[in-house]
Image (cartoon, grey):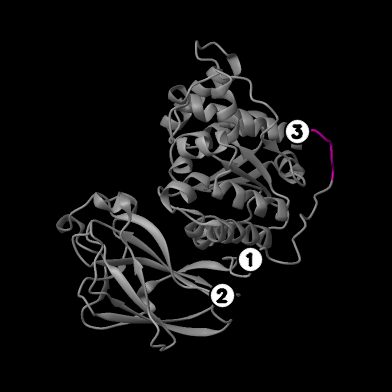
């Protein structure tokens, strides 16, 4: 953990533990902390092995220096003799569908995880705009893969907040991503932190304000509220003294047969493409639009000539494309297994206007188990706000049992 994170966590511990600030962290309730199943395995590992692997996957709220380093600091304080490995698998703008396909690469490939935190409610809402089906498929993909990789791993899912989601709660409605994620968590007996609902309660009871909390990307004060909820959940989950690890139960049936429970990212180099496409590092200095350095130096499958095409053969029931969609993002024409039937996929996103925006679009779903070939052409149509027809694919998102 670098100096900036250390500095941040020290400030938070002073604020939330010593309570010496004029902006004291309000007392969090138990109403929105939901303990399901068991969390005792992680405590046993931390205490008995002297080592622990804690991973956090999510969007920018996870990637930033927020709740994640605060929770890390709490764990180091709680278990001072334990050597921790902390994995930050947050990628700004990404949703649970992208998360389900990158979990292996960004988390599971690093070894067994003892305690996994998942955060995608805000991104599924305001970034991806997922319907119920895709919010379920993304979250179930994450949980099923994590359970299969290590059936003893403890998992906590946290629902952060934006004002739209909070206003839905005030109207007596639960935002779609929270409903979807909770249903999956109940199915898999996964504990949840509903920070969004807690924040509504705190603000409406005049115990804090949205400005103090800090907005969609919370200030240290707001992240300390989340950390306090997580600590309360862990204290409750670790309350009993146990001396034996348990295997967490796995449901016999999936909630949705289309869930990305075998999700993985595949290198686009295997595509077969015409002369208008290439696999290389784009010259980002010559392409208008903001660019995040974490994607610098990566080879992409890219092209921008209308009616140029590529084919990609894959195993599984669905295929997505993890793309960087910028101000010139195009529209794809998609054919599956040589069918004349076509559908189009618009890569342009409302955040594409000034940024090469990372997102996963699904090209084909609901396919029979087996081998398929997809043919993709750059369509002649264009989003009204786009300046071009460019396609830039970081990875294909496959979903094949292995």
In the rendered image, the vertical position of residue 377 relative to residue 224, given as above or below: below
Q: Identify residue for label 3.
A: 236
Disc nearest the viewer among 1 and 2: 1
In the rendered image, the vertical position of residue 313 relative to residue 140, given as above or below: below
In the image, is residue 228 part of the stretch drawn in magenta? no
Q: Nearer the viewer, residue 277 or 43?
A: 277
CA neighbours of label 3 inside 10 A, class few (<14), some (14 to 19), many (20+) = some
Q: Nearer the viewer, residue 107 or 342?
A: 342
Which span is picked out in magenta? 239-243
Q: Residue at x 76, y 42 (%)?
A: 40
Secondary structure of the residue carrying tag 1 is loop
Q: Earlier in the sequence, mark 1 or mark 2?
A: 1
CA neighbours of label 1 inside 10 A, class few (<14), some (14 to 19), many (20+) = some
The image quarter containing residue 201 is top right
* 93 left or right, relative to 20: left
Q: Nearer the viewer, residue 314 or 87?
A: 314
């Amino acid at each position: 953990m670098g100096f900036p994170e250390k500095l941040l966590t020290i400030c938070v511990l002073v604020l939330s533990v010593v309570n010496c600030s004029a902006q004291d962290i309000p007392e969090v309730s138990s109403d929105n902390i939901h303990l399901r199943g068991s969390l005792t395995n992680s405590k046993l590992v931390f205490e008995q092995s002297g080592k622990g692997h804690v991973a956090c996957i999510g969007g920018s709220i996870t990637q930033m220096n927020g709740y994640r380093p605060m929770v890390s600091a709490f764990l180091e304080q709680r278990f001072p003799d334990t050597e921790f490995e902390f994995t930050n698998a947050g990628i700004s703008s990404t949703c649970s569908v992208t998360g389900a396909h990158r979990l292996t690469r960004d988390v599971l490939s690093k070894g067994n995880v003892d305690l996994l935190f998942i955060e995608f409610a805000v991104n599924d809402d305001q970034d991806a705009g997922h319907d119920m089906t895709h919010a379920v498929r993304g979250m179930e993909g994450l949980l099923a893969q994590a359970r299969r990789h290590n059936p003893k791993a403890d998992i906590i899912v946290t629902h952060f907040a934006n004002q739209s989601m909070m206003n839905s709660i005030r109207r007596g409605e639960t935002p779609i991503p929270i409903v979807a994620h909770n249903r999956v968590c109940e199915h898999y007996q996964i504990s949840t932190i509903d920070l969004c609902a807690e924040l509504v309660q705190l603000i409406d009871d005049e115990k804090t304000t949205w400005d103090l909390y800090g907005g969609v990307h919370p200030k240290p004060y707001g992240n300390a509220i989340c950390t306090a909820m997580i600590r309360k959940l862990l204290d409750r989950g670790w309350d009993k003294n146990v001396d034996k690890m348990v295997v967490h139960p796995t449901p016999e049936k999936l909630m949705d047969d289309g869930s990305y429970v075998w999700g993985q990212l595949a290198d686009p180099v295997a595509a077969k493409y015409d002369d208008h496409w290439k696999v290389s590092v784009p010259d980002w200095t010559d392409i208008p639009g903001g660019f995040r350095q974490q994607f610098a130096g990566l080879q992409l499958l890219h092209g921008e000539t209308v009616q140029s095409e590529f084919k990609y053969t894959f195993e599984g029931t669905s295929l997505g494309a993890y793309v960087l969609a910028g101000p010139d993002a195009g529209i794809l024409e998609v054919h599956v297994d040589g069918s004349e039937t076509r559908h189009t996929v618009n890569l342009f996103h409302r955040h594409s206007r000034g940024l090469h925006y990372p997102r996963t679009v699904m090209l084909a779903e609901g396919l029979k188990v087996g081998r398929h070939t997809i043919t993709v052409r750059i369509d002649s149509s264009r989003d009204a706000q786009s300046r071009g027809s460019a396609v830039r694919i970081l990875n294909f998102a496959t979903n094949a049992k292995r």
